[in-house]
Amino acid sequence: MDNSISSFYLVSTSIGLSKVTIQDPFADPVPNPVPSLLSLSIRESGIMSQQQSSLDYPEMKELVDRNAAWSKEMWKKDPGFFPKHYPGQRPKVLWIGCSDARVPETTIMGCQPGDIFVHRNIANTYSPQDDSLNAVMMIALQNFKVKHIVVTGHTNCVGCNQALNMSRLPPTPATTPLQRYVQPVAALARVLATEDCPPTLDLLVEENVVQQVKNLLESQIIKDDWKRRGTRGVVIHGWVYHLEDGTIRDLRISQGPPGHTPARTGDY
């Protein structure tokens, strides 16, 4: 008798409705995956080492094992968790954060998968030319109609520290992707510097968040959202996460569309 837990959903596709079964993967043995055409073509190309399983590498096997343990525990604790999340997501917040491994937004905010839509990059920056983040913002605002975007920097930021080091030297053409990427933050550090000394790293981290919030407020995507949704448009926030004690500091620079006021719980 099959005691596995499964759920069925009708999922919209380009050719109509498709019936999808979501089943506890630990109820029955999982078959070995069939090599994809891509993997076969790479294997035959000879441009890199022979393909192997991730499980041949101890660090990767540990991650896969942890995932299996987590998934198994979730199925045991809440059998409806994965079936509930498969059909779609309804996040209310877009998090623009740093790539730093010590700042996993879902963990530090005590949230669950599906709660926060996320984009992370070096030093939590935004530029109008960044189509990766622009695309994320369009999906967040147009598809999910998120209510908040929060730019979150953090103390002891490697990207800001790189920019700070660059700011102490005479401006020169950037020669690496990292140098090119943090050039605007280095320029900000030069503005913040006094005759006596450059800004502290903590100051640069905070002012960088302020600058990125300003950049977002000036972006066409945000202006379009405010025009479309009026006073119920997205609100932009600035935070700094403190690695030393695990707490969030609100920089109190939140700004929404003209005429917007913070809503009472349940009204927004």
Image: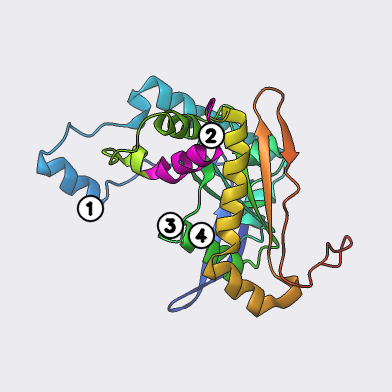
Foreground disc of the pair 4, 1: 4
CA–CA distance in space, label 2 to label 1: 55 Å
For the residues carrying marks 2 and 1, which lies nearer the camera in this image?
2
Q: Do tag 2 and tag 4 residues touch (Cβ < 8 Å)?
A: no
Give x and y (percent) for residue 167. 43, 33
Q: Are marks 2 and 1 in contact (CB under 8 Å)?
A: no
The residue pinned by badge 2 equals 193
Instruction: Name the residue beneath numbered marker 3.
Output: 132
Query: What secondary structure is marked by label 3?
Result: helix
Amino acid type at image mark 2: Ala
- In the image, taking residue 165 as reference, residue 224 lies left or right, namely right
Q: Quadrant of the C terminus?
A: bottom right
In this rendering, position of residue 250 left or right of residue 86: right
- Horizontally, residue 38 falls left or right of residue 220, namely left
Magenta residue span: 181-197
Question: Dot 4: few (<14), some (14–19), or many (≥20) neighbours within 10 Å?
Answer: some
**In the rendered structure, are the residues bearing label 4 and label 3 in contact, judged by CB atoms less than 8 Å apart?**
yes
**How many angstroms separate mark 3 from mark 1 (CA)?**
27 Å
Question: Can you identify the residue that label 1 sits on?
Answer: 37
Residue drawn at x 55%, y 32% is: 194
Q: Callout 1 environment at 10 Å: few (<14), some (14 to 19), or many (20+)?
A: few
Q: Looking at this view, name the residue that lies furthest to the right.
A: 264
According to the picture, the residue beneath numbered tag 4 turns out to be: 136
